[in-house]
Amino acid sequence: MDWIFLCLVIFLFVLAVSDLWVGVSNDAVNFLNSAIGSRAAGFRTIIVIAAMGVFFGAIMSNGMMDIARHGIFRPEQFSFQELMFIFLAVMVTDIILLDVFNSLGMPTSTTVSMVFELLGATFGLTILKMVSADAGLGFSDYMNTEKALSVIMAIFVSVAIAFVTGLLVQYISRILFTFQYKGKLRYKIGIFGGIAVTAIVYFMLIKGTKDLTFMTPELKLWIRENTWTLLLCCLCGFTVLMQVLYWLKVNVFKVVVLIGTFALATAFAGNDLVNFIGVPLSGFASYQDYVLSGSSDPSAHMMGVLNEKASTPFVFLLGSGIVMVMALALSKKAHKVTETEINLARQDESDEMFGTSRVARSMVRWGNSVGAFFSRITPESVGKWIDSRFDKNEIEMEEGAAYDLVRASVNLVVASLLIALGTSLKLPLSTTYVTFMVAMSTSLADRAWGRESAVFRITGVLSVIGGWLLTAAVAFACAFILALVMYFGGNIAAILIVLAGLAALIHNNINFKHKEGRKEQDTVNRILTSHDRNAAWTIFAGYLADSETDFLKMISACYEKVTDGLMTENVRILRKSTIELKREKVNFKNLRKKMTLCLRSSETERALKKSAWFHMLFNSMEQLYYSLRRIAEPSYEHIDNNFSPIPEDYSKDFAAKRDMLLELMNFIADKCRSGDFEAVRESDPRTEFLQKEFSDMRKVLIRDMSTKDMNLSVAYLYLNLLQESEQMAIEIRQLSRATRKFQVG
């Protein structure tokens, strides 16, 4: 039977490699975003610096492996077989859970996932052991509840502390430097740079190096006893150095951001490594102890050996560092996760990734009320002075950046200090939680959440926080279930679960690659961040044509389904079509906002000439949408109430004209897709013919209503259908003209 456990240990290490890759894809957001969002350096330079930090931290770290060994459960109460089931449940749940979040572009906490997976799996087996045992042991005898509770409380309290601290520090920093900071540095930059770099050094000493393998007890004691002396020397030395660099025309803010990126990457690899390889290494240590004991019963060999302090072999740290660096450089999902936080923190308007929610709308109204109250009680002169410090008319920001270097520096320094403080107080904070909330609070302090974007940004923040809570709940439940399945199913169930987890992971990665090829977000970002205005215009024109094609195809398909559903009295089709149209309203609004932002980022002179046709095009698309809504909703209500159908002779007459309108919409869509805009006429005679036909049919109906005994409900419904179809023909003509003028000239 030993060979089965050897296979399971090998599986654990295979999953550990995958978990390292997935974990770095998720946690890269912690140390990359400030540098990428502010354009402190080129993307490759940032990746190289972060990779050096990651590798340095990984190979020299012993991490916090004790959390995985005895921080959640009491190993002396569990057998080797039971702990192997717990470890397998944790790893399978972890890689799938994190990979799903990364594919959605949502940052989540690897600390939360690992802690709650260990809690869930341990809780499941603890219940079984308490039910079957006669020893009278309680939860606290099987689970390290005190340590687990401190981890959970520290994680969630840190969210509020990080947000408030980041808000205050950024507000003060912005008043000090303003958005036109380059002309206001003088001697302030030396002091700011000295404080910032000293804070980062403190962070590395306290947080990043406390568990490095070369740190002897004597060296740790010396650092602890001389911390304040070291910090004072660093403050004086770095203040002078930063001032000299400023006189030498070096951008000190970029230096601070890049040093902070290295420091956070080092600490991440050195201390969060337990989240990725802590469980597999604990499984390996358990297997070694089981084999050395000579025991033949894995269900009877208890694992008190895990209470000993962890000592991680260097070869595992080296291998982990290599995998983490490769993931950082090659993972597309890492880039996608950074995109979420950067967009939420962007200084200007952007393509908002999230919609709105009732809670966000209420919070915005409350925030506006609080802001208005403080505006009333603040002296007018003070208010004007503060507003002048937040004047963004001439903001100094790197081209294509989401925010400036002042905010990026504050992000890194505040996050570093808070994590260092938590560590000094022995509170295991989540780097993801702290860095994300600091980034959100500094963007709020910078007034980046304007009235047009605040509700979207708050919804995004709430979505990410909700994702963290969901991570905890799902991690606990999944690990709980998997542990129970393996407990009752034995080794066979364990192997099947691991294989199923690997298969799901491979399938999810394949789907992600396929989705990424179709995502329009890449196109929008290319336009918004392009340095070549002509190239941006070319991309924008193609993107607009593709979007127009998709819109017309959607409208024509829905128009056909709605009218068919009305004529055939199919309430199911009408219900689905009405719901689909309501959903499309959000998509259309987002599309128009994206297009307007892209138009601003395209070639200025040409954009000014074409803007009128651009807005006419979208107005026509909007009217087409609302005309179809005004057809669909009354039709659904009519058929749902089982009212009389439209007479057959009217239906046949209408169907012929409807098919011509569908053919016209599909014709324009196909020409837009192929780029043959010359074939799109400014005044297509077919639209004029259809307009006249629908008008004549409407006149016939009105005459019939006066001379014949007609059902008025049916007559009004059909009259509405003809009026809106006529309006759609008019809008198609306007859309054709605007399309040709915009694309051809």
Image (spheres, rainbow, N blue to C red):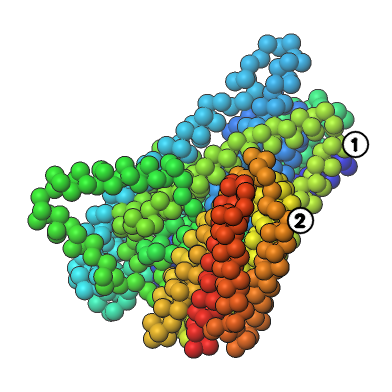
Secondary structure under tag 2 reads helix
- Residue at the extreme right: 1
How far across and how far down the image is residue 404, in percent? 35, 67
Quadrant of residue 638 within the rendered picture? top right
Q: Total label count?
A: 2
In the rendering, which numbered label is found on residue 173?
none
Circle 1 sits on which residue? Answer: 1
How far across and how far down the image is residue 624, in percent? 54, 65
* Mark 1 or 2, closer to the camera: 2
Quadrant of residue 370 within the rendered picture? top left
- Residue at the extreme front: 707
Disc 1 and disc 2: Cα gap in Å? 31 Å
Give whichever of 617, 61 is nearer the camera: 617
How far across and how far down the image is residue 534, in percent? 48, 86
Neighbours of disc 1 within 10 Å: few (<14), some (14-19), many (20+): few
Give whichever of 109, 731 is nearer the camera: 731
Quadrant of residue 304 within the rendered picture? top right
How far across and how far down the image is residue 392, in percent? 27, 67
Neighbours of disc 2 within 10 Å: few (<14), some (14-19), many (20+): few
Secondary structure under tag 1 reads loop
Amino acid on which the number 1 mark rests in the picture: Met
- CB-based contact (under 8 Å), mark 1 and mark 2: no
Residue occupying the point 55% across, 83% down: 683
Give whichever of 497, 115 is nearer the camera: 497
Circle 2 sits on which residue? Answer: 507
Q: Is residue 464 visible?
A: yes
Amino acid on which the number 2 mark rests in the picture: His
Look at the picture and state if 174 lies above or below 100.
Answer: below
**Upstream in the sequence, badge 1 or badge 2?**
1
Relative horizontal placement of residue 11, taking residue 254 as reference (left or right): right
